[in-house]
Amino acid sequence: MKKDLIVIGAGASGIMAAISAARDGKSVLLLEKMQKIGLKLKASGGGRCNLTNRLDSKEFMESFGRDGRFMQNALKKFNNQALQDFFEEIGVKTDSLDGFRVFPVGHNSQSVLTALESELNRLNVKISCKEIVNSIKKENSIFYIKTENREYSAKAVIIATGGAGYPQLGSSGDGYKFAKELGHRVTKIYPAMMPLKTKERWVANCRANTLPKVTIKVDIKKYKKLQAKGDLIFTKDGIRGPVVLDFSREITPLLDKFQSVPVLISLTNLSSHEIYEIFKKELAKGFNGNTLELVQKILPKSVAKELILEANCDFELKFNKQKGANRDRLLNILAWTPLTIIGHNGFDMAMVTRGGVNLKDINPNTLESRVVSGLYFCGEVINLDGPCGGFNLQWAFTSGFLAGKLKH
């Protein structure tokens, strides 16, 4: 079977690449190793599918770090408004209830996938599932792709295989292997956007509580600028929640380097002095409770109790009856709570992969390989990853759109 284009991987970026090329009149074959297309897309955001956000392109790129500028040309061709217009065109209305994140109306990822499948069918894109690609070779300007079932050929190939996270949904790092075999450099990869495990066991006693808008930062001198803000949830063996999902992309490479990473968390975004002033005012108003009841003025009971114990205080004693050194320690712990990150669940629980095909081997204007002409990359297989909030899906769709434009 010979096509103008073969797209390997039917996630968000691969589906968009196939649509983009087919709309330009190209004959397209979309290969997917799983039994259905778009499994990770369907699961994204807990099935709610945060498609994009309202940031302008400059702020959007900055959220990806120093390499974010690589996206500049792609975003000029297909930004967040273009994505919303595209989905409107294929029958998916979007909304932004919080003024930042953009979801399909109804917050249902199945509606997104159904519309994309309909568009693929309308454009006569050939979809072949349960196709595990074994090799990609190029001879005399033609690509030959061998799967476990048969051999295909095409004038161009797009690798849209995703990263290595959530292998049960199809991402197992195949694209990195193909890229290397075809002469590309691939950076070290790390799991990202995932819960983290802590050395401290007291967190298990606080599982009932979600703490909003906390600040977390690395407590290593060289990396003190690394920080994130958002909601935090304690678990039986660590921490999770949006702030942790975002921050894990900074932590996993450090864990690889240091084995454990000390962090500080501001659970209230108050300084020790501000906390002391709050307590002073409560006591001045005639508050007559114990230390636990006082700390509950700023934190949930289970968290308050554990931090009081961490400070070697007696939570049944009144605050002004605690030893001076312990009282000071408590104020400091309440302001910045220390935790030690010691691990994670690896790629099995990673929603995103940090690392990928080296950006220097890809032309940012077309996403064509600088090493092999006619070969393109898009989505998570490329060394770009962003935080929670629609960043990674927007990049998947944007890069798929651009790669599908095919230079030839």
Image (tube, grey):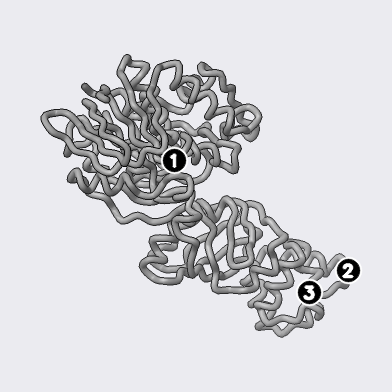
Measure the alpha-carbon separation of dots 3 and 2: 14 Å
Residue 356: horizontal and vertical position, in percent?
32, 48
Q: Is residue 363 visible?
A: no
Circle 2 residues within 10 Å: few <14, some 14–19, many ≥20: few
Quadrant in the picture for residue 291: bottom right
Labels 3, 2: front one? 3
Pick the residue in front: 145 or 256: 145
Q: Residue at x 65, y 83 (%)?
A: 325
Labels 1, 3: front one? 1
Q: Residue at x 86, y 69 (%)?
A: 287
Q: Which residue is drawn at 46% across and 34% down?
A: 37
Q: What element carries label 1?
A: loop
Measure the alpha-carbon separation of dots 2 and 1: 65 Å
Residue 15: horizontal and vertical position, in percent?
41, 29
Residue 362: horizontal and vertical position, in percent?
24, 38
When the figure is inspected, residue 94 is found, relative to residue 389, above or below; the finding is: above
Q: Which amino acid does label 3 sit on?
A: Thr
Q: Mark 1 points at which residue?
A: 34
- Location of the C terminus (image quadrant): top left
Q: Mark 2 points at which residue?
A: 286
Looking at the image, do the residues carrying marks 1 and 3 touch, with CB atoms under 8 Å apart?
no
Quadrant in the picture for residue 26: top left
Q: Which residue is drawn at 55% across and 69% down?
A: 198
Q: What element carries label 2?
A: loop
Q: Which amino acid does label 2 sit on?
A: Gly
Q: Name the residue under label 3.
A: 291
- Dot label at residue 65: none
Measure the alpha-carbon separation of dots 1 and 3: 56 Å
Q: Which amino acid does label 1 sit on?
A: Met
When the figure is inspected, residue 261 is found, relative to residue 163, above or below; the finding is: below
The earlier-in-sequence mark between 2 and 1 is 1
